[in-house]
Image (cartoon, grey):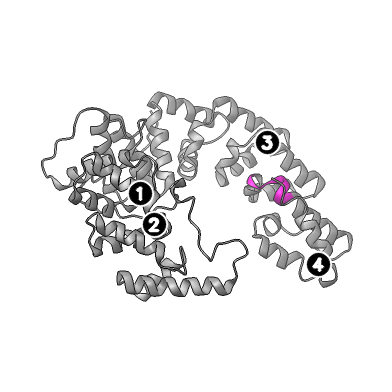
């Protein structure tokens, strides 16, 4: 049996009492009506500055925030009128939230200041109270995890957070039986490892694997932790899901497939640490990918190097790999070795990056404007840089050709 636990040791501590106040980056359609003067179509920079200045002043005056914190928040939302923010703060106060709780809520989730208090926010709070939530429970849970107010199924999130808070506050808490008990226990364990709210919230309402399991969850979590995955990243969740869903036998069989094309066991787990989803790639896809690269002229060693450097390429369509490789090698005359050194190029859009940039390069070559002694610059210097850097390197320094080169660069880039 192949050992999964060979990449360092970290103790697995499942403890309670940690804060749920982490940062979330993605919100639901709850904020779809959000708008600000800074983001309005045709809005002028002067209006944006006024909005930011007004926002900073409002946050300092109304919530007692420091100017530094208020300026940070103004980068996310800003407004030039206090009507809506005032209605939001008044709504919270009417539901029993104290100023320190409101300050935390707005600091963690400032977009709430732009929400319609009467038609969007109010009904959510009222629905929770109608289900029996007391004022103290409501204020505690919302101020602990403000971002559940941005979720469509708020009652489900609310109940899950409530259960976890109860478990945290009781030293002799007994987890209920079944999925909900396992979920509370497992999410508490992930919180104990420092997993942020943006990753926990989806797990709180999950009715599927892995957080509803028990023994298999513990074993999978232990493996992921001992492999050294960072629990603050989505890669940790993906690795946990991959190991949870696959039996030891299935994992061993998948490792054997990778070994059959030349990877060592250590290679497989190093690749897994970079891109956990490689474990779900089918045997047929792995073998076909290997044959495709060999058919394009790559050696076995070069194929192994490509995948080890950039594991996602094993998941790309064979047609995409073939098309990009043939274009860059046969039409642009870069050697295969350059793609082996920079396999990230297989992940770039053919239509919106590769073709346009290569056409700019062809135009420069046709006029002899590239440096002598090097017909082509490196693949990475052309394809791996940002648009701004590319334009600086290959467009703006050729003053008389800028309009023509920019036209080539932009051709087809606006296409869907």
Q: Nearer the viewer, mark 4 or mark 1?
A: 1
For the magenta stretch, what is the residue range?
A: 347-354
Q: Most prominent secondary structure in the magenta stretch? A: helix
Q: Mark 1 points at which residue?
A: 149
Q: Distance between the residues labelled 3 and 4?
A: 38 Å
User: CA separation, marks 3 and 2?
Assistant: 51 Å
Say whether disc 4 or disc 2 marks the residue closer to the N-terminus: 2
Question: Residues under labels 4 and 2: Cα distance?
Answer: 45 Å
x%, y% of residue 136? 18, 51
Tell me the crowding category of disc 3: few under 14, some 14 to 19, or many 20 or more residues within 10 angstroms, Cα based: many
* Residue for badge 4: 402
Inter-mark Cα distance, 3 to 1: 49 Å
Q: In this view, does 51 lie to the left or right of 110?
A: right
- In the rendered image, which quarter is residue 187 located in? top left
Q: Which residue is drawn at 49% across and 37% down?
A: 277
Label 3 or label 2, whichever lies nearer to me, is: 2
| Viewport quadrant of the N terminus | top left
As drawn, the label of residue 293 is 3
Which numbered marker is on residue 255?
none
* Secondary-structure class at tag 1: helix
Determine which of the numbered discs, if any, sits on residue 112 in the image.
2
Can you tell which of label 4 and label 2 is closer to the viewer? Answer: 2
- Structural distance between the alpha carbons of marks 2 and 1: 9 Å
The mark that comes first in sequence, 3 or 2, is: 2
Circle 3/circle 2 CB separation < 8 Å: no
Q: Are the two marked residues, 2 and 1, in contact with CB atoms closer than 8 angstroms?
A: yes
Q: Is residue 230 visible?
A: no
Q: Is residue 210 above or below residue 335?
A: above
Which is more N-terminal, label 1 or label 4?
A: 1
Q: Where is residue 279 in the image (x, y as percent from the top left)?
A: 48, 33
> Can residue 392 be spotted in the picture?
yes
């Amino acid at each position: 049996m192949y050992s999964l636990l060979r990449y360092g040791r970290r103790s697995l501590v499942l403890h309670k009492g940690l804060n749920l106040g982490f940062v979330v980056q993605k919100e639901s359609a709850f904020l779809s009506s959000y708008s600000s003067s800074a983001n309005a179509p045709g809005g002028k920079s002067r209006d944006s500055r006024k909005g930011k200045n007004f926002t900073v002043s409002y946050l300092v005056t109304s919530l007692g925030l420091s100017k530094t914190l208020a300026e940070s928040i103004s980068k996310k939302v800003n407004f030039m009128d206090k009507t809506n923010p005032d209605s939001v703060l008044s709504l919270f106060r009417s539901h029993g939230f104290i100023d320190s709780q409101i300050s935390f809520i707005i600091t963690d989730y400032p977009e709430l200041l732009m929400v319609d208090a009467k038609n969007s926010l109010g009904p959510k709070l009222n629905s929770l109270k109608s289900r029996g939530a007391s004022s103290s429970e409501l204020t505690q849970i919302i101020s602990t995890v403000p971002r559940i107010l941005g979720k469509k199924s708020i009652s489900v999130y609310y109940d899950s957070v409530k259960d976890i808070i109860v478990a945290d506050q009781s030293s002799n808490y007994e987890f209920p039986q079944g999925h909900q008990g396992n979920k509370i226990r497992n999410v508490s364990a992930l919180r104990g490892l420092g997993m942020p709210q943006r990753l926990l919230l989806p797990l709180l309402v999950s009715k599927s694997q892995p957080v509803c399991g028990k023994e298999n969850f513990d074993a999978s979590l232990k493996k992921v932790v001992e492999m050294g995955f960072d629990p603050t990243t989505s890669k940790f969740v993906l690795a946990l899901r991959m190991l949870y869903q696959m039996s030891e036998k299935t994992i061993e069989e998948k490792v054997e497939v990778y070994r059959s094309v030349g990877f060592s066991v250590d290679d497989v787990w190093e690749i897994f640490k970079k891109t956990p989803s490689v474990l779900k790639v089918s045997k047929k896809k792995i073998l076909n990918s290997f044959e495709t690269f060999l058919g394009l002229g790559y050696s076995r060693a070069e194929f192994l190097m490509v995948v080890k450097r950039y594991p996602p390429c094993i998941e790309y369509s064979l047609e995409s790999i073939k098309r990009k490789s043939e274009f860059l090698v046969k039409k642009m005359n870069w050697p295969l070795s350059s793609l082996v050194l920079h396999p990230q190029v297989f992940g770039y859009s053919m239509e919106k990056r590769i073709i346009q940039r290569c056409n700019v390069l062809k135009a420069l070559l046709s006029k002899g404007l590239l440096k002598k002694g090097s017909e082509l610059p490196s693949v990475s210097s052309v394809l791996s840089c940002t648009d701004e850097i590319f334009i600086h390197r290959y467009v703006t320094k050729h003053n008389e050709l800028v309009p023509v080169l920019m036209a080539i660069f932009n051709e087809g880039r606006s296409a869907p």
